[in-house]
Image (spheres, rainbow, N blue to C red):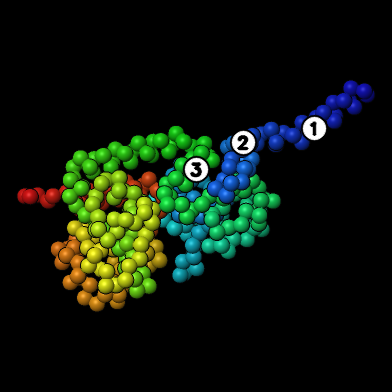
Amino acid sequence: MNLLRVLIPTALTLMLIGPTLAQETRSFTDDAGRTVDIPAEPERIASLHDLFFSVPLIELGVLPAGSHGRAGEDGSSFMRSSKMMTGVDFDTADIAFLGTGTEIDPETVAALEPDLIILSTNQDPELFAHIAPTILLDFDRSDKFELYERLAEITGTQDRLALLEARYEQQIGQLRTLVDTGSISVNVIAAVEGQIRSYRHFAALGRVLDDAGFAMPEAVEDVAYGQLSDHSPEMLPAMDADLVFVTYRAEMGETPQDAYDLLEAAVPGYCAFLTACQNGRLIAIPRDETFVSSYGALGMLTYTLLALTTPPAGQ
């Protein structure tokens, strides 16, 4: 009897502490300066930003249990750029749709039973911290691929990131070898609310252009890396370059013609102000693939630039 009195409480104690022992933790300091104990190997991540968190996690081999997303005009939900880059979306994988923008209900996140919540800059950690370990990453930082490094650190997938980086370095090296990039100027623009916006330094395409060493118009030379810049319509001629990309939201149903129509509305007869347009070098590309933090996107954009800047046969 005395032996049972000892063994039974001991067994119950082991049962209670078993889950705790199974979930090893470590300290992590987030971008808000908060030090949080997070799982050493998180298994059920709630990701509250699709473009900058969920897509990188998927590329790193970590499928979030739930994710922030977008609402299509037909009422469907999707993660921006995810299916194009990874094939993974709410309709192809077991990922719960948590909501859009800042409209994410803590109760919806709690129902997911996450072991880690990764918040975007526009979310309040205090609303979610009672559910699971909660960290905030600043998606307003200039270099979005720094977030990629943080996510690899959080999930212990640095080796996977190193392979992705090695592949990209090989791709960008090939571009620099085959193309005299310094002699070719490139800009990336869109007409947004009547202004001419330059994305020359911004997001995935901005990184490729900088890493490859392409020149740029003087009007955007002083824009900080990772930033976009807005210009009045009369500045369109200063946006000209040897190659000009114009972007459009393909995932929201926009087409290249929509991008051209917006330019026309902002600057009637816009083609007359851009030698790139007159020379057939105004190229429309989807904005979603140029924005996303994705090594798949970096590779796609590198080969796009290689195809567009390699001299054709006979030259």
Badge 2: how crowded within 10 Å, few (<14), some, or many (20+)? few
- Determine whether 239 is above or below 43 in the image: below
Q: What's under tag 1, amino acid-wise?
A: Thr
- Residue 87 visible from this viewpoint: no
Q: What's under tag 2, amino acid-wise?
A: Arg
- Determine whether 176 is above or below 268 in the image: above
Kindly state the secondary structure of the residue where label 3 is placed. helix
Label ID, residue 13: 1
Taking depth in this image into account, of 103 and 85 the one nearest to the observer is: 103
Task: Tell which circle, 2 or 1, labels the residue nearer the N-terminal end.
Answer: 1
Residue 141 appears at what percent x and percent y?
46, 52
Query: Disc 1 or disc 3, which is closer to the eye?
Result: 3
Q: What's under tag 3, amino acid-wise?
A: Arg
Q: Is residue 267 left or right of residue 230?
A: left
Residue for badge 2: 26
What is the spatial separation of the Cα atoms under label 1 and label 3, in whole angstroms?
36 Å
Kindly state the secondary structure of the residue where label 1 is placed. helix
Q: Residue at x 6, y 50 (%)?
A: 314
Residue 179 appears at what percent x and percent y?
18, 45
Residue for badge 3: 150
Q: Residue at x 20, y 40 (%)?
A: 177
